[in-house]
Amino acid sequence: MDSTNITSPVMFILLGLSDIPYLQVIYFLMFFVMYITTLAGNLLLIIVVRINLTLQTPMYFFLSNLSFIDICFSSTIVPKILINTLGKDRRISLLGCAFQMYFSLALGATECIILAVMAYDRFVAICMPLHYNTVMSKKLCITLAVGSWMACFVNSSIHVFITFQLPYCKSHHISHFFCEIPPLLQLSCRDTRLNEIAMYVSAGILVMMAFFLTLISYIHIISTIFRIQSSQRRQKVFSTCASHLTVVTLYYGTIMFMYLRPRSAYLPETDKTISILYTVVTPMLNPFIYSVRNTDVKLTIKNCLTRKWTI
């Protein structure tokens, strides 16, 4: 190959979801509603946790972290989707693409770790209730949260650095709606096996370890639940985990499907659908999944609304 062709672009072009006009309008309205719902739902959950003193517990501390991550995660991706869906200019600068990849990777990985930490919190609460306040101390909670954020942002910086060291000479058109590693690797004219290995190792260490920590926690939790004699109490204990288990299943399933497949298995349309699930749909559903089954959250919202109407 001619060495003059081995260059990096000044900018990329995101092909987005569709070029059909009526579909573009539908996608715009759909993503706009989901984004506003995501912001409103997660902000409401954070506010509820802040104003209700009974919710100042480790579980809600991590839930607030999760809501903040979801707001940032969606804000990294969805506004660009909205602009590109109706706009004719779908270009994104090299720096803009790098920043989008950096924050989406970091926030996505942080959500995985926080979900695992939340599973551990439920394990301690259910399997070691007498030691809960001692084990899940304020210091440990802050350490786990800060450690999760730091580890994932460092990991993301490594991936972004090695990804943008590649020359992109096959095409500058990204068959996706945001800058993600798999579709970018397909554009490089250099052997990307090192990048793929780094991606698999990273996903193995962060995502799989988080997944197995969650799995082990739930094995102990389910074992403890089955030993409870009262069916009413057993149902009550399980209901405290059902919301988290729903989120974990949806999020881990899509992330592992996206990042733990061989490069030959990537299909642009399938990948876009999978990406929508964990970048847009899950952040929107999280606050509702947690609040619908949570009496304390619903009661706090009801009291606030009642107080407002009374005033």
Image (cartoon, rainbow, N blue to C red):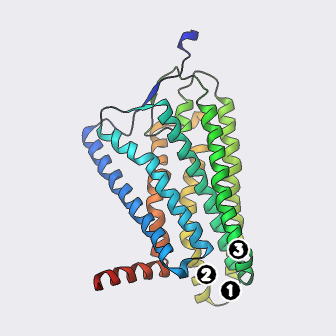
Screen quadrant of the N terminus:
top right
Residue 258: assigned label: none
Q: Position of residue 120 (x, y in %)?
A: 68, 68
Distance in Å between CA atoms under marks 3 and 2 = 22 Å
Screen quadrant of the C terminus:
bottom left
Say few, some or many: other residues with alpha carbon within 10 Å of mark 1 (under 14 / 14 to 19 / 20 or more).
few
Element marked by disc 1: loop
As rendered, which of 267 and 66 lies closer to the eye? 66
Task: Identify whether 240 is placed above or below 98.
Answer: below
Q: How many marks?
A: 3
Q: Residue at x 53, y 22 (%)?
A: 8
Which mark sits nearer the N-terminus, 3 or 1? 3
Residue type, mark 3 in image: Ser
Distance in Å between CA atoms under marks 2 and 1 = 9 Å
Q: Which residue is mark 3?
A: 137
Q: Residue at x 69, y 47 (%)?
A: 204
